[in-house]
Every structure is written in structure tokens, then in C-alpha cells.
Amino acid sequence: MTLDRNQKTVAQCVGVVLIMGSLAWAAVPLYDWFCRVTGYGGTTNVSETESDVILDRTILVRFDASLARDMPWEFRPMQTSMELRIGETGLAFYEAYNPTDQPIAGTASYNVAPFDAGLYFSKIECFCFQQQVLEPGQRVEMPVTFYVDPALVDDPEANGTPAITLSYTFHVTDIPEDYAALAGSTD
């Protein structure tokens, strides 16, 4: 079966649309994977254990907090910075407060600056790994446990980094259904 000129044009257009749609669908997970593997854009690593190597060289870690425009919480780091030896485990706390009269759920997005250091900033435990729900008037301290990977000193792009800034932004998210059902059963 041979296609006439109009049928070929339609088949080519459909093919282009399918390919473009497939690429668009795959773009977000591929970009996320790329950022996690390379640390691009300040994406951090996740580690299940502490570093087994601690260097004598120190690095300053700064902490930053912000809120999305629609987030009514108050959110701040409880310390502005700490100096750690590279490879040493650090523990920092952020504080969140819900000043409203209703429960609010939030999720924290994060990044590290400079971006070259993202590949070497490893979180062991973080409040950002789960959604947070604060009751009206509730104030919480949220920990993040981390270290700066000693491999940083072997990377010519990141080796001269004197300080790393860990930034979080809280965004409003929907309250989980099971949480809303549990809260509704107490009324």
C-alpha cells in the first residue's frame, strides 16, 4: 500500500506530534534524575549513613528560609550558619509556626548554592522528605541532618567553595485525606 502525498503529510505530522508529546511527558522525570545525579541546579544528595571520612578542612554552611506567596506560615532557620569539618555530620533546625485558625499542610522545596556544591551536600534526615501539617497556633522545630561529602575537595569546580547555603521554601499543599478524616472524627 502506498500513501499519496496528503496521507504522507498527515502521517508525518502525527509522528511529530507523538514524538513531541513523548518527549514532553519524559522531560520532568529525566530532568529530575539528571539533577539528582549531577547536583545540577543545587539539588542535594540523600544518604542513609554519615560520612566515614572527616577532613581537617572546614566549610561554612548557611541556612535560608522562605515561603511561597500563598503560604501563611512563619518559617525561619534557628541558626544562620555553622562551620563544620568537611565530612562531619551537622544538625540544624528550622522553625515553622501556623498563625492561622485552621490546619495548614506544607511541603518544602530546597536547593543548595553554589550549584556546584549540590552534588556534595548529602542529607541523612530532613523535614523536607515528608509533608508537614501544622495545627492552628502550632509551632514546631524541624531538624535536618547532613554532611558535606569529602569528594568536594577533589572536584576542581567545587574545591574552592568557602561556604554553602542551604535554602528551603515552604509551599501550601492539600491536607492528606486520611489526616482530614482523622481530624473530622474528633469534631
Image (cartoon, rainbow, N blue to C red):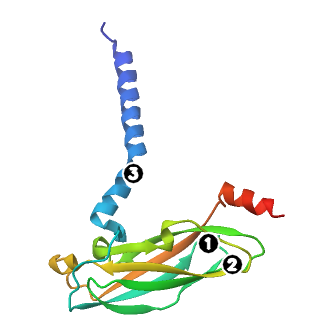
Alpha carbon separation for disc pair 2 and 3: 32 Å
Is 105 left or right of 61, judged from the image as shown?
A: right
Q: Which residue is denoted by mark 3 in the rendering?
A: 29
Looking at the rendered image, the disc whose residue lies closer to the viewer, 3 or 1, is: 3
Label 3 with label 1: CB-CB less than 8 Å: no
Looking at the rendered image, the disc whose residue lies closer to the viewer, 2 or 3, is: 2
In x, y percent, where is residue 54? Answer: 23, 85
Q: Which residue is denoted by mark 1 in the rendering?
A: 69
SS class of the residue under badge 2?
Answer: loop
Q: Which mark is residue 98?
A: 2
Looking at the rendered image, the disc whose residue lies closer to the viewer, 2 or 1, is: 2
Mark 3 or mark 2, which is nearer the start of the sequence? 3
Q: What is the count of numbered marks?
A: 3
Q: As shown in the figure, which amino acid type bears the numbered disc 2?
A: Asn
Is 187 left or right of 120, judged from the image as shown?
A: right
Q: As shown in the figure, which amino acid type bears the numbered disc 3?
A: Pro
54 or 35, which is in the foreground? Answer: 54
